[in-house]
Amino acid sequence: MRKLFSTVTKKVVIGYLVIVFFSMLAIGFALFRLHQQTGRIKQLVNVDFRAFELVRDLQQNLLAQENIEKQLLILRDPALRELRSNREEEMAHYVSLLNRPPLKTQFASLSAVLTKYRTVDDKLSEALLWGRWSEAVEISNKSTVPIRGRLLKQLAEFREDQQLRINSGLAELSEKSSEAYRLTLFFALIGICLSAPVSIALVLSIHRSIRALKKATFEISIGSFEHRPDLNSDDEFGQLANDFSRMGRKLRELEQLRLDANPLTRLPGNLAIDRELDQRINNQIPFSHLYIDLDNFKVYSDRYGYKAGSDVLARVGEMIQRVVQREGSPEDLIGHIGGDDYLVLTRLELGEVLAEKLISEFEQLAPSFYNEEDRLRGSFVGQDRFGIERTFPLMTVSIALIRSDHYDYPSRLTISQDCARLKEYLKMQEGSNYMLDRRK
């Protein structure tokens, strides 16, 4: 009996040790692979996706600089210098981010051309500042435009390489997850064959976790960024699930940023506006183009501060959205060009209606921007752009209204030029006004 008991005991012990061995082997292998994948996911999120985002932002900034530079050299409007200066500050911020570890090594190839571009851009800025327009045109044509084109080309090539790297990383994650799943299941099945109830529960848990993570990897690799792994745990599986969730949110944010939304008002920016204008022009869809500009906004910001100026821009953007949603049509586009300039694209017959409603709403909203003393007086003392102190009225709004049917062949350039001409005239008038260009 003792011999039998001893034999049975040995079998139980041996069986238990076998189960423990294969269970530990399966768990160890799975955790090792999960650790590797967690590190790779962090690399994708913190380096690869971040690099992709920064390059995209830098491209958009360069395109915006190019658009503003063209307008400034054509219109020679000093008011555009501030907008150009803002774009230069944004670019400096992006470059500083690119020069930080661990992104610095990835962008070493772009450093030389970036430095060269900023050098010639500084020369162009100096010429524009002092109104040396001929010199500015020469610098732009001979230096800035070619170097910017080369830089945009290199950025585009870098983005393509980065996209391939991201796709390869996601595919590798999916392949590693599949491999980890197969091998872990193999080891676990051996333990199951030895009739270990504990190992059954363990294998099922690992199987469920790896299956969820494999599905998450596949879904993200095909662009389904809303997918969330069905895992609720605090172990490595849960951490990896959280990394997947963060990666999905980051990718979704990248998709949203493609809309070129203005960071203050969340309204579409210049690239989205240009795409919509080109689409309507190319498809011969008639439209009204409303260019909305706040008068005396700069002196208001000088008096009340940057924060108050930002609040005004945000509230005006909300007001425009309310009016267009109430009085416009579902296909209307509301855009924020930058600074205190907004744009609305609507149907032909709604242009003047929206212009009148926008002026009415703004006249009711504007007094709330000021303190009681300025509001009662209806004006305040400030310095103009030349540093001369004078009295300014409360903020008003000017709306340049262009109808596409006034052109035989409408284009973004002609519409932009006509808007600038109308805006210049409106700014010389008192109060809030809009003007419709009825000339063919």
Image: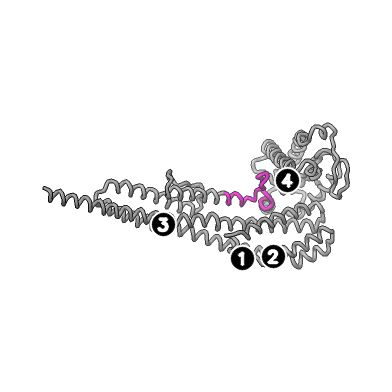
Mark closer to the chain start, 3 or 4: 3
Residue found at the far front of this picture: 2
Dot 3 alpha-carbon crowd within 10 angstroms: few under 14, some 14 to 19, many 20 or more = some
Q: Amino acid at mark 2?
A: Thr
- Disc assigned to residue 115: 2
Residue denoted by label 1? 108
- Vertical side of 205 occupied by 121: above or below: below
Residue 27 screen position, x and y as percent? 35, 53
Q: CA distance from mark 3 to mark 2?
A: 42 Å
Residue denoted by label 3? 33
Residue denoted by label 4? 342
Q: Which segment did they paint magenta?
A: 253-273
Mark closer to the chain start, 3 or 1: 3
Q: CA distance from mark 2 to mark 4?
A: 33 Å
Mark closer to the chain start, 2 or 4: 2
Mark 1: secondary structure:
helix
Q: CA distance from mark 3 to mark 4?
A: 52 Å
Residue found at the far left of this picture: 1
Mark 4: secondary structure:
strand
User: Residue shown at 75%/67% (left/top)?
Assistant: 143
Q: Amino acid at mark 4?
A: Tyr
